[in-house]
Image (cartoon, rainbow, N blue to C red):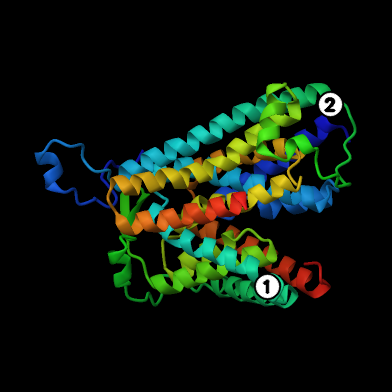
């Protein structure tokens, strides 16, 4: 696939090697972990959505659609806690919605993981930037 | 139309949206919204909710591959996300003050001009500005895979790029558009990054921008599972395929496709601005 040479070799403090502490994360390590997290989030969300979608089609597949009228969605699909309760009771729509919530949570988890990686790298400037992005993101999600 | 047929058709269309969105860094919304509203007569609010889902699916689905292959520049992504998130908050606060119709027309004209410039063959390699020392300080410079090895690149005009991204965040809050277009343009035209780095880094960032407003749309009931599930699965499959195809894709063709999408968006903005549909 690609050459294993690091893209931007992080200057590893030699002190770390001398006292036997684990080496600081390189940017390449961060890329691998962030990529894996995104993949895991997407796969998990897809499994749940496929499950819910199959049930939805099995139960309502032959019904005629009427999406030209906005009904605002059922209340049990409009909050995360109600969605979880609905999914636990096997409601197909709620299972799909749970998968969508997992999908929405994936980029948020990605920012949080990047923050952790910059903390591990002791890169103060990027810790500050990522923390600001995460804070604004959570503000937008929960306000 | 029965739900089963609807799901099948929407999933097929969404596949194309994901493919296009992942390869151009624009997300799938540009295809998903008109497809749902015009072809399937879905209410615009459900379409917006589904579009948001499609952007996150495209972003995360393709980024999983792009980040690990080393196309995406994570530092540039974070650095510019600061600008877009602040811009989005400022835009939301200004929503009652700014004349959005005039803004849509202005934005449409700017997009058309940009498309004209790139069609005229104004290659970004011509008259390259000097590398920005700020790029070195912020460790934004990098390299990306291009057979047979990796090609190094330096960042230009970091401040201008950041400023454009601030504007991109405001625009997406004010005009309700995915800011993928402005993101790619900021990195490609202002910061002079390689095209594939610009599109994949934009793709990496749009998921975060979309997730920021997802909570609001969920609470308002815009996200309907029966519509969103075929959209998500179709888009995701398209995005995963797009990410595989990108490595071998010809940049000249990617640029042409990107420019075509920019033109469509420009016309859409002008139409909305002139008819007051925004």
x then y, percent, for residue B2: 87, 32
User: Considering only vertical position in the picture, is B137 above or below B209?
Assistant: below
Q: Nearer the viewer, residue B49 or B54?
A: B49
Which residue is at 39% across, 77% downward? B127
x then y, percent, for residue B116: 60, 74
Which residue is at 48% across, 39% downward? A38
Quadrant position of residue B19: top right
Kindly report the distance in space between the C-alpha atoms of the residues bearing marks 2 and 1.
Answer: 42 Å
Q: Nearer the viewer, residue A98 or B53?
A: A98
x then y, percent, for residue B24: 55, 54
Q: Which residue is mark 1?
A: B108
Quadrant position of residue B105: bottom right
Side of A50 relative to A108 (left or right): right
User: Considering only vertical position in the picture, is A85 above or below B16?
Assistant: above
Query: The disc numbered 2 marks a residue on which chain?
Result: A
Report helix, strand or loop for mark 1: helix
């Amino acid at each position: 696939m690609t050459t294993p040479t690091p893209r931007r070799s992080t200057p590893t403090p030699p002190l770390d090697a001398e006292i036997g502490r684990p080496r600081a994360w390189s940017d390449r390590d961060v890329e691998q972990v962030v990529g894996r997290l995104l993949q895991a989030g997407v796969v998990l969300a897809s499994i749940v959505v496929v499950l819910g979608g199959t049930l939805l089609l099995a139960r309502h597949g032959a019904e005629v659609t009427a999406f030209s009228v906005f009904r605002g969605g059922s209340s049990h699909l409009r909050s995360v806690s109600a969605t979880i309760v609905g999914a636990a009771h096997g409601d197909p729509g709620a299972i799909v919605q749970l998968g969508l919530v997992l999908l929405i949570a994936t980029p948020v988890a990605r920012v949080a993981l990047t923050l952790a990686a910059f903390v591990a790298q002791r890169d103060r400037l990027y810790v500050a930037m990522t923390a600001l992005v995460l804070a604004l993101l959570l503000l937008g999600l929960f306000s | 139309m029965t739900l089963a047929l609807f799901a099948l058709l929407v999933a097929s269309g969404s596949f194309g949206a994901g493919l296009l969105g992942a390869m151009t860094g624009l997300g799938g919304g540009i295809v998903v919204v008109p497809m749902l509203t015009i072809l399937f007569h879905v209410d615009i609010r459900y379409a917006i909710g589904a579009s948001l889902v499609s952007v996150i699916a495209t972003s995360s689905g393709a980024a999983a591959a792009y980040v690990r292959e080393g196309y995406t520049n994570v530092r540039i992504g974070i650095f510019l996300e600061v600008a877009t998130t602040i811009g989005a908050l400022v835009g939301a606060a200004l929503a009652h003050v700014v004349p959005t119709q005039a803004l849509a027309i202005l934005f449409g004209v700017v997009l058309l001009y940009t498309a004209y410039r790139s069609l005229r063959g104004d290659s970004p390699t011509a008259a390259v500005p000097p590398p920005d020392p700020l790029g070195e300080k912020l460790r934004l410079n990098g390299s990306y895979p291009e057979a047979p090895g990796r090609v190094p690149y330096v960042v230009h005009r970091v401040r201008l790029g950041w400023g454009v991204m601030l504007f991109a965040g405001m625009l997406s809050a004010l005009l309700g558009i995915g800011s993928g277009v402005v993101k790619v343009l900021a990195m490609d035209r202002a910061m002079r990054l390689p095209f594939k780095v610009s599109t994949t880094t934009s793709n990496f960032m749009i998921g975060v921008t979309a997730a920021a407003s997802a909570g609001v749309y969920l609470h308002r009931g815009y996200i309907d599972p029966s519509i969103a599930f075929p959209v998500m699965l179709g888009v995701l499959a398209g995005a995963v395929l797009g990410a595989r195809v990108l490595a071998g894709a010809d940049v000249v063709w990617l640029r042409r496709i990107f420019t075509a999408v920019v033109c469509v968006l420009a016309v859409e903005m002008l139409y909305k601005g002139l008819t007051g549909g925004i």
